[in-house]
Each structure stands twice: as structure tokens, then as C-alpha cells.
Amino acid sequence: MTFDWQENDIKMAQFMVGKMHKIAEAMNPKMIIGGAKKPGTHFDSTVYQTTHISGGAIMGDDPKTSAVNRYLQSWDVPNVFVPGGSAFPQGLGYNPTGMVAVLTYWSAKAIREQYLKNLGALVQA
């Protein structure tokens, strides 16, 4: 399994760093440290970059291009649900905890109210 920053990840980081830099400058600090990743930058596990790595069991509308449906249910094995940040196709650019919680709640509600009453796929492919 491999992971590396993609072009859009770097562009999102550059955009946010630019916005944060303007805010920091307006505060008239003695020093500003930090900067955005440069195009072509690769993920490096030896330095802190983020603790919010996501992806792996991508959520989508098509079983040919995703691993789980919108309820985080496996397309291939209907009694397997995969809550967590693995459903995201890319990094969100900020802390994913809120979205992970919402998706997990959404999935649990569907399991309780739909799946347990009629075992099987919640979304037809």
C-alpha cells in the first residue's frame, strides 16, 4: 500500500496557508514560521505532516469505482460496514472528526432502521 500527496492536496494546502499567512500578518507578529508544500512534494513519514490520513475504502455511487456505498456498506459483502475516514477519496484539508462522526451516525441509523429489518444491500447497484 502506498500514499503520496496528489496535486490537489498540495493546491488545497497552498490555498489555506496563503489565507492563514494573511491572517497572521494582520496580527503583526514578531515572526511567522511555516509554509505550504511545493508542487511535487512527497509524503515523508519522518516529519509531522498530518495525523488525518484517510482513504482506502472509498465511498461512492458505483461499485466499479468505490468500495462502500453511501451508508458505508461494502458493495461486495452486505453485512460489512466500514465507518471511518477510510471512506474519503482524499484528504479533507482539515480535521475530519466531525465528518467521520456524522457518517458513522448516518451508517448506524441505516443499519438500525433499514438493514436489520431487511438484511441485504441498502443501495442497489
Image: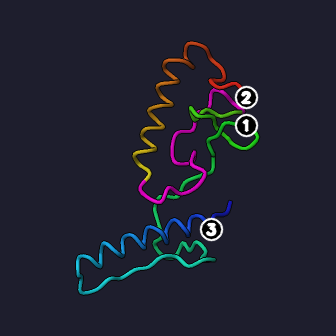
Q: Is 115 on the left-hand or right-hand side of 96?
A: right
Q: Which quadrant holds the N terminus?
A: bottom right
Task: Please tell me how crowded label 2 is: few (under 14), some (14-19), or many (20+) other residues with Cα within 10 Å.
Answer: few
* x and y percentages locating residue 69 in the rendered image: 63, 34
Determine which residue is flagged by label 1.
63
Residue occupying the far top of the picture? 117
Q: Amino acid at mark 1?
A: Pro
**Of callouts 2 and 3, which one flags the residue occurring earlier in the amino acid sequence?**
3
Determine which residue is flagged by label 2.
125
Mark 1 to mark 2: distance in Å? Answer: 7 Å
The answer to whether residue 99 is above or below residue 114 is: below
**Of callouts 1 and 3, which one flags the residue occurring earlier in the amino acid sequence?**
3
State if disc 3 and disc 1 touch (CB < 8 Å). Answer: no
Q: Amino acid at mark 2?
A: Ala
- Closer to us: 31 or 95: 31
Q: Secondary structure at mark 2?
A: loop
Mark 1 to mark 3: distance in Å? Answer: 25 Å
Determine which residue is flagged by label 3.
7
* x and y percentages locating residue 117 in the rendered image: 56, 12
Mark 2 to mark 3: distance in Å? Answer: 31 Å
Residue occupying the far bottom of the picture? 30
Residue occupying the far right of the picture? 64
* x and y percentages locating residue 31 in the rendered image: 28, 86
Identified at 58% across, 34% down, the residue is: 70
* x and y percentages locating residue 113 in the rendered image: 49, 18
The magenta stretch spans which residues? 76-95
